[in-house]
Amino acid sequence: MARVADAVWYPIWDAGIDLDHAVRTVPEMLAVGRADVKAALGLIDARYVAGDRGMAERVRAAVRVDWRRQAAAHLAELHEITAARWDRFGELAFEPEGDLKEARGGLRDGVVLRGIALAQLVPGPRGAVGEAYRRLLNVREALHARAGRRLDRLVAELTGPVAELLADAGAGLPPADRVVPVGRPTDVTDWRRLDPGLALRAQIADDARTISYATQDAWRSVRRLRGTRTSFGVRRGRVSRRPLDDGVVEQDGEVVLARAALAPERADPALPIRVVAAAARSGLPVAGPTLEWLAASCAAPPVPWPPAVREAFLRLLGSGPGLVEAWEAADRYGLIERWLPEWSAVRNLPQPGPVHRHTVDRHLVQTVVCAAEASRAVSRPDLLLLGALLHDIGKGRGVDHSAAGAAIAERVGARMGLEPGDVAVLGRLVRRHLLLPDTATRRDLADPVTAGAVAEAVDTTDLLDLLAALSVADATAAGPLAASRWRLELIGTLVGRVRATLRTGESPSPSPPAPEVLALAAGPLPAVASTDEMVRVVAPGEPGLLAAVSGCLAAHRLTVRSADVSPLPGSSAVAVECAIGPDFGTGPDPARLAADLRRAVRGEFPVAERLAARERGYPRAGSGAAPPRVVWHDGAATGAVVLELRAADRIGLLYRVARALAGADAWVRSARISTLGASAVDTFYLVGEFTSAARRAAVAEAVLAAAAG
């Protein structure tokens, strides 16, 4: 038998195909299935390949009989395994490069659904769920073909090739009239047809959400049908109904309609919203039949919305973390588009890059949850919640999403029956939702012009408070890159300075040198002091100082987030202060870093050689990366002109650009370094004469060459 088995396995292994194997008798196979739920789940789907077909069919039939007989034990263990897998792999619909097989909503959940169905407790994965499963199988097979190996994560560089292969095979997206939901606004740019890669990721997200919701619903059905609340084998008592809201009750752990709410003569446009809000507040799921009835029986609210509908919707938005699952369930049944027809344009819209961890629609809902936590910090929590829900609603149109979103937000606000003044504030909130984070990370906060410009844009402290709360909620919902402590502290500092400007009518004066800087200046130069987050260097003021410091920091795998270069009063010395953070892991030894910084300032540290060695170990941006660009900003600083560089990030970028600026006799007073994923937006405050076009062109040429070199 061993020789026969080896003759089967070795040619497969020699072909480089990963294959698990076992040689067992029929009784041994059945014994394994009874003892191991994972093995049993695999045997349920056993397929005949060659040999004795009758034996294969008898084994599969016997395994399925055993599965049904041991359903209570198997399903209890399978539920624990499934929950652990979800925690480990996350959600396929929202992970940037989710695991098609193991993530929540992936192919493994389709197998779990079949296992639950074979226990004769719920229907199998048919209809939309079956179609979603087959499409994910097609994607996985195309991914294996394009990758040339087993790969279950659709990485960015393979998205386009996989989409092309699926299109060629006719096994990719659904028909065109089903890719874009019917009833979408006529001003929506069809991003799904413009970018096949985005369309594929959107379809994967939708299919994963379909499977995920069906799996959750199946587990709820298992618990309910077996008469338990939290585990198998523990019986529950008599079913009771508990009121949750007008016309809404809890029954058997689910949100359902009260009997009176079903009366045909009772037309209640707020009822669907109250049902979903009750689910969000209680953390209970809405029963499937209830959602089906609401979808079939309840029309969109009249326009403008009656006050009861608007108030119910605001209570829904303010319900906290439970909003995510409740909103998802309502969206699965088409209720959200009845309240917000614009929602279809951002549903499943991917956000490429590492900053956002969710699709646009899920990000908007997560932002609402985060904004609800700040509702006591603003005078108009209702506008904050609506702004959070709509701040990115303009994405996917091929234009400035803030401007497009503001127009949509005003339209939505008017439809909801907001007062004209509130509609205007909502539009400004969406239009300006990036004002604070962009300014905080790209401008010198100590410059009075910065706070003055923001104060002029916001006009009132009420709008400033709304923008501040929305900015933090937006960043928190986006993910750790956007919500780093450094970024949030910068936003807080900017808000404080703008608030002072609005209160007094004057921008705060620049702060004097920090005591730590003055202490360094009192000793021998160059002098260095550092913490985990800040490096201060005081040295004689010479061209190239910023380049030397930033280059040494990059050689030590430290990212510079901001840099200030300040002449010290009554001295020829200059202070360079850099906010830093490690590229990864822990930072370097402080004593060694300080010694190397002093060497770098004296020209004794081989900055260029060290950076070249680091670069050799990392891939450069591909040929498809957009070329760098320089933008000049006049009137954005006091006694300086602002040069903004937009480029692909690379090791030592600040060093190269600072060296190029020094070579062009451009003195850098301060710099703000903003790196988001593979892109950098670096802002330099240049002191000197930059009014002539020739002078600017020469400086820009030097900077662009440094960024591209």
Image (cartoon, grey):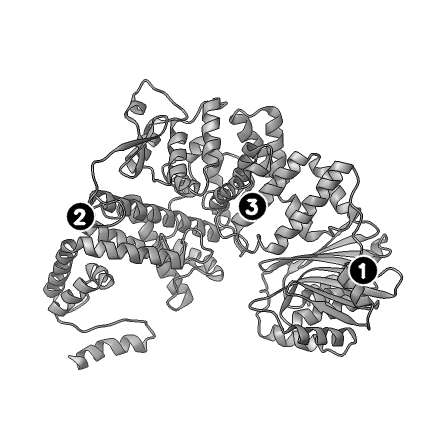
Q: What SS does tag 3 mark? A: helix
In which quadrant is the N terminus drawn?
A: bottom left
Q: Left of 401 or right of it: where is 243?
A: left
- Which amino acid lies under the numbered mark 3 shown in the image of this protein? Asp
Q: Nearer the viewer, residue 9 or 377?
A: 377
Residue 138 makes an appearance in the image: no
Mark 3 vs mark 1, CA separation in Å: 33 Å
Q: How many marks?
A: 3
Bin the neighbour count of mark 2 within 10 Å (Cα to Cα): few under 14, some 14-19, many 20 and up.
few
- Residue annotated with mark 2: 120
Determine the residue positioned at 54% across, 38% down: 390
Badge nearest the viewer, 1 or 2: 1
Mark 2 vs mark 3, CA separation in Å: 44 Å
Determine the residue positioned at 41% across, 31% down: 273
Q: Position of residue 227 (x, y in %)?
A: 20, 43
Which of the two labelled residues, at mark 2 and mark 3, occupies the earlier sequence position?
2
Determine the residue positioned at 45% across, 37% down: 319
Q: Nearer the viewer, residue 87 or 432?
A: 87
Which of the two labelled residues, at mark 3 and mark 1, occupies the earlier sequence position?
3
Q: What SS does tag 2 mark? A: loop
Bin the neighbour count of mark 3 within 10 Å (Cα to Cα): few under 14, some 14-19, many 20 and up.
many
Q: Position of residue 692 (x, y in %)?
A: 86, 53
- Residue annotated with mark 3: 474
Mark 1 vs mark 2, CA separation in Å: 74 Å
- Residue annotated with mark 1: 566
Q: Position of residue 72 (x, y in %)?
A: 19, 53
Which of the two labelled residues, at mark 1 and mark 2, occupies the earlier sequence position?
2
Q: Are marks 3 and 1 in contact (CB under 8 Å)?
A: no
Q: Left of 390 or right of it: where is 85?
A: left
Badge nearest the viewer, 3 or 1: 1
Q: Position of residue 144 (x, y in %)?
A: 38, 64
